[in-house]
Amino acid sequence: MPLSEHERRQLEQIEQGLRAGDPRFAGAVRAADPRVHYRRRVIAAALGFLAGVGLLLAGVVINVILISVAGFVVMLACALWAVTSYRRMIGRTPAKDSGSASKRRAAKGRRAGTQAKPGLMERLEERWRRRAQPPDGG
């Protein structure tokens, strides 16, 4: 629930008083903000990604496949780390239970009076069933 304008002004006044009264404590509290840590993780992941690119290129230049593969794995891991940290930094966390999200979407579609679109697996299963059936028209 968002803060009202009055509550927001009160919070800003308290923060200003805290910064003026004890700057060390205010700095420690600001550093405890999770966004700061996630930003650092995104930066570290970007540097790791660049290191992976360097390994990949070094492996290609000296013609050692193992180093190239290691560079690609480092790039992949750092990209995943950066994306998850960025999502957490901006407040969008990935759904922990993807099944419940699809159930909510399907229930929402039924409530609106429209059928929910079938997922990938349902479409593939339907195609498989149609493949096994003989053609009707001919």
Image (cartoon, helix red, strand yellow):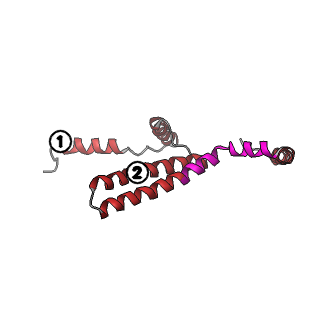
Give the SS element for disc 2.
helix
Q: Which residue is painted at 55% across and 43% down in the image?
A: 93
Amino acid tagged 1: Ala
Say whether disc 1 or disc 2 marks the residue closer to the N-terminus.
2
- The x and y percentages for residue 26 are 78, 44
Residue that carries the numbered disc 1 in the rendered image: 132
At label 2, counting other C-alpha atoms closer than 10 Å, the crowd grade (few under 14, some 14-19, many 20 or more) is: many
Q: State the residue in front, 97 or 84.
A: 84
Horizontal side, residue 118 vs residue 3: left or right: left
Q: Is residue 35 magenta?
A: yes
At label 1, counting other C-alpha atoms closer than 10 Å, the crowd grade (few under 14, some 14-19, many 20 or more) is: few
Q: State the residue in front, 133 or 58.
A: 58
Q: State the residue in front, 98 or 36.
A: 36
> Which residues are the magenta region?
23-43
Predominant SS along the magenta part: helix
- Which part of the image, by quadrant, shows the N terminus? top right
Q: Which residue is painted at 35% across and 58% down in the image?
A: 56
- The x and y percentages for residue 44 are 53, 52
Horizontal side, residue 98 vs residue 34: left or right: left
Q: Where is 49 relative to 101, above or below?
A: below
Number of callouts: 2
Name which quarter of the figure residue 131 lies in.
Answer: top left
Q: Which residue is painted at 55% across and 49% down in the image?
A: 41
Horizontal side, residue 71 vs residue 9: left or right: left
Residue at far front of view = 62
Q: Is residue 98 magenta?
A: no
- The x and y percentages for residue 40 are 59, 50
Residue that carries the numbered disc 2 in the rendered image: 74
Q: Label for residue 66?
A: none
Q: CA distance from mark 1 to mark 2?
A: 44 Å
Amino acid tagged 2: Val
